[in-house]
């Protein structure tokens, strides 16, 4: 049984008498007749391993037969000559472990059959209007057919309530993908550090990093890279990457490789000329200590919020130490004064999606406890905006340090730990293989 069949079996058990309808992603138009690169819907991929568009998975545990069915594009010689091989109906059964498969064009006619006899439907409404229409019509048709007895869905549920809890707990196979994504990110970030010199353009550094991801086995980036020189680092979602790196500035790189559909998410910040200034070093040191304090809390039984609280406390203490904030630490935290320098949270789940699925809170609105197998990012930062009332020498400094951390039954396991982040290691590697001037 493949891992995908095992996951479908686990979802089948969790669904009880409900039916799940999980669509593949569609091609998205970039401009005119050019499409964006195709990226599969993570839920669909998790349950099928199929990387094709225009497919829908149905899991109907209440049925005697055809409990797991895939609707997908049939083989088509001409289409395959133009666009590449398709799995097809036969392949879905022979190679993907499906009891039955049908052409996607038959979904509207066949879907009502799968809805008969169930009282609730797990379908993520609001993501795809065309499919929403088709599913609602099928529900209407099923309700019509049972007027003289039987059941048809009366309620809709988010598939995420079951599926996303499964995805939150990573298996050994998934962790292997995530370790390989981390290894590719290591190759990219280290190459980027070596290539950095004053005068290099942000997009050149971006290209060096992403080229090395691919050379190390990544099929893609997990999200658009942020390569932010100087004060661009204080713009949290800067990713135009069009400016030149200047002597005396830092560069913040938030970039991660995607390997076999799993993400890594890494931020490193290093000096363009290979040497931190006194102020840069002071800020960097605070962020690094906050990051290490946060990582220490990635342990089973700790509240999800503990690592954020630990990072905020260390950042606030550091800001007071260097004179950028004044007052009692507790009060500065309670009144959110640190927010001027640190306006984001300290991380998120990571997996198939860079901001991965899974609840952060329990039903009583308190943060849930961490468990072995959960993977999250720890990514504190400090950003000294130019309009803050602080001495000029601090202005424009932006630092973030981000690693991907697995909660184990004991010590935190930092998947991205090999990527340099100690000041001495960064100063040693930066510029050691600077690109020839272009
Ligand atoms: N790169 C996105 C994030 O750090 O959350
Ligand atoms: Mn992140
Ligand atoms: Mn990031």
Image (spheres, rainbow, N blue to C red):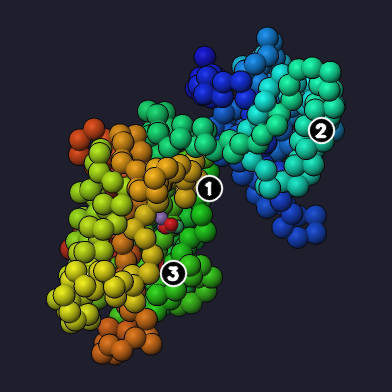
Q: Residue at x 62, y 18 (%)?
A: 61
Frontmost of labels 1 and 3 is 3
Q: Residue at x 53, y 70 (%)?
A: 240
Image: 169 above or below 60 = below
Q: Residue at x 43, y 37 (%)?
A: 168
Which mark is drawn over residue 140?
2
Dot 1 crowding, Cα within 10 Å, few <14, some 14–19, many 20+: many
Label 1: element kind: strand
Alpha carbons under labels 1 and 2: distance apart: 41 Å
Ligand 1's image quarter is bottom left
Alpha carbons under labels 1 and 3: distance apart: 22 Å
> Which residue is denoted by mark 1 in the rendering?
220
Residue 433 shows up from this direction: no
Frontmost of labels 1 and 2 is 2
> How far from the left and from the top, in percent, is residue 130?
79, 44
Find out if the beta carbon at label 1 lies less than 8 Å from the nearest ligand 1 atom: no
Frontmost of labels 2 and 3 is 2
Which mark is drawn over residue 308?
none
> How far from the left and from the top, in percent, is residue 248?
30, 80
Total labels: the figure holds 3
Question: Within the image, what quadrant is residue 324 found in?
Answer: bottom left
Image: 385 above or below 102 = below
> Which residue is denoted by mark 3 in the rendering?
236
Q: Mark 2 or mark 3: name the one nearer the start of the chain.
A: 2
Q: Mark 1 or mark 3: name the one nearer the start of the chain.
A: 1
Tell which of 162 and 393 is nearer to you.
162
Label 2: element kind: helix
């Amino acid at each position: 049984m493949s891992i995908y069949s095992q996951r479908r079996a686990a979802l089948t058990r969790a669904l009880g008498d409900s039916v799940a309808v999980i669509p593949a992603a569609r091609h998205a138009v970039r401009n005119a007749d050019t499409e964006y690169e195709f990226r599969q819907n993570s839920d669909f991929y998790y349950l099928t391993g199929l990387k094709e568009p225009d497919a829908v998975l149905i899991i109907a545990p209440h049925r005697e037969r055809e409990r797991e069915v895939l609707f997908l594009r049939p083989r088509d010689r001409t289409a395959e000559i133009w666009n590449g091989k398709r799995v097809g109906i036969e392949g879905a059964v022979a190679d993907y472990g499906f009891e039955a498969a049908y052409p996607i064009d038959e979904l509207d006619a066949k879907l009502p059959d799968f809805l008969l006899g169930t009282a609730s439907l797990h379908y993520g409404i609001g993501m795809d209007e065309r499919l929403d229409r088709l599913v609602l019509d099928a529900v209407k048709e099923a309700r019509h057919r049972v007027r003289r007895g039987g059941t048809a869905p009366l309620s809709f549920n988010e598939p995420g309530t079951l599926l996303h809890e499964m995805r939150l707990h990573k298996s050994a196979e998934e962790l292997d993908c995530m370790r390989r994504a981390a290894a590719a990110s290591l190759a990219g970030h280290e190459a980027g550090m070596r290539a950095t010199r004053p005068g290099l353009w942000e997009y050149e550094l971006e290209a060096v990093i992403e080229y090395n991801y691919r050379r190390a086995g990544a099929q893609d980036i997990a999200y658009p890279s942020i390569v932010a020189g100087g004060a661009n680092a204080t713009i949290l979602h800067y990713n135009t990457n069009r400016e030149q790196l200047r002597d005396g500035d830092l560069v913040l790189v938030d970039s991660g490789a995607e390997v076999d559909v799993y993400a890594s998410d890494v931020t490193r910040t290093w000096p363009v000329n290979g040497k931190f200034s006194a102020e840069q070093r002071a800020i960097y040191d605070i962020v690094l200590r906050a990051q290490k304090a946060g990582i220490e809390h990635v342990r089973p039984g700790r509240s999800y919020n503990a690592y954020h609280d630990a990072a905020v406390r260390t950042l606030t203490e550091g800001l007071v130490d260097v004179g950028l904030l004044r007052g009692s630490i507790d009060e500065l935290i309670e009144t959110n004064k640190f927010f001027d320098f640190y306006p984001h949270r300290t991380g998120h789940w990571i997996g198939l999606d860079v901001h991965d699925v899974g609840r952060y809170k329990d039903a009583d609105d308190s943060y849930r406890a961490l468990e072995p197998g959960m993977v999250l990012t720890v990514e504190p930062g400090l950003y000294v905006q130019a309009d803050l009332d602080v001495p000029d020498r601090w202005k424009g400094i932006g630092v973030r340090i981000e690693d991907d951390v697995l909660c184990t039954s004991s010590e935190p396991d930092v998947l991205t730990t090999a990527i340099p982040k100690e000041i001495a290691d960064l100063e040693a590697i930066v510029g050691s293989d600077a690109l020839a001037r272009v």
